[in-house]
Amino acid sequence: MAVFIKPDSFDPFAMQRAHEANLKKESIGAAASFIGTMRDFNEGDDVTGLMLEHYPGMTEKELEAVIDDARSQWPIDDALIVHRVGDIKPGEPIVLTVVWSAHRAAAFDACRFLMEALKSRAPFWKKETLKDGTHRWVERNTPGY
C-alpha cells in the first residue's frame, strides 16, 4: 500500500507500473485504476488553472486511512494513491487510484471507494483561476455520479 503527494506533474501509467513491479503477481487476478485530470471548466465557467493545497502529514495520514478502510471492506492485495498539489493546468493528471485484487469486483469497487472517499475526506483545498483572470476557492467537490 502506498500514498504519494506530488508537487509536480506525474505519469500515472509509469507510477502504476513502478508500483506493480514490486507486487507478488501470482495471486492478483485484477487491477482497477482511475486517473483524474483537470478540466478546463467548472460550474459553468472556463478555468485556466488550479492551485491545489494540502496539509502535509495530515493529508497522507488520511489517504492511508482511506486505503485501510478499503482493505477492511474488500479482499484487496494492494492499493496506490497518487495526488498532485501545486499549480495544475487543464489536461494534467491530478489523481491516480489503483487497486490490485484476486477478483475484478473487489478491484473495481475498492478503486471507486478510494476515489470517492478521498474526495470527501482528504484535506485538500482548490483555488481556480478563471479565464477572465479572477480566482475563486472551490467550495465542494464534483459529485461522483
Image: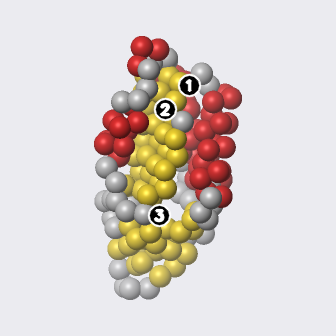
Q: Amino acid at mark 3?
A: Val
Name the residue tied to disc 1: 76
Name the residue tied to disc 2: 99
Query: Do the CB atoms of the residues marked 2 and 3 lie less than 8 Å apart?
Result: no
Q: How is the image coloured?
A: secondary structure
Between the residue at mark 1 and the residue at mark 2, the CA separation in whole angstroms equals 7 Å
Name the residue tied to disc 3: 85
Q: In percent of the image, x 38 and y 85: which residue is there?
A: 133
Is the N terminus in the top left, top right, bottom left or bottom right quadrant?
top right
Query: Do the CB atoms of the residues marked 1 and 2 lie less than 8 Å apart?
Result: yes
The label on residue 98 is none
Residue 1 appears left or right of 48: right
Task: Say few, some or many: other residues with alpha carbon within 10 Å of mark 3 (under 14 / 14 to 19 / 20 or more).
Answer: many
Mark 1 or mark 2, earlier in chain: 1
Q: In percent of the image, x 32 and y 41: which residue is there?
A: 13
Residue 36 point in image, percent of width and height: 41, 51
Residue 49 appears left or right of 121: left
Q: In front: 107, or 134?
A: 107
Between the residue at mark 3 and the residue at mark 1, the CA separation in whole angstroms equals 27 Å
Q: Secondary structure at mark 2?
A: strand
Q: In percent of the image, x 40 and y 36: which residue is there?
A: 19
Q: Secondary structure at mark 1?
A: strand
Q: Secondary structure at mark 3?
A: loop
Q: In percent of the image, x 34 and y 67: which residue is there?
A: 89
Residue 53 point in image, percent of width and height: 53, 68
Q: Amino acid at mark 2?
A: Val
- Does 106 appear above or below 130? above
- Does 83 appear above or below 34? below
Judge whether residue 108 can be spotted in this image. Answer: no
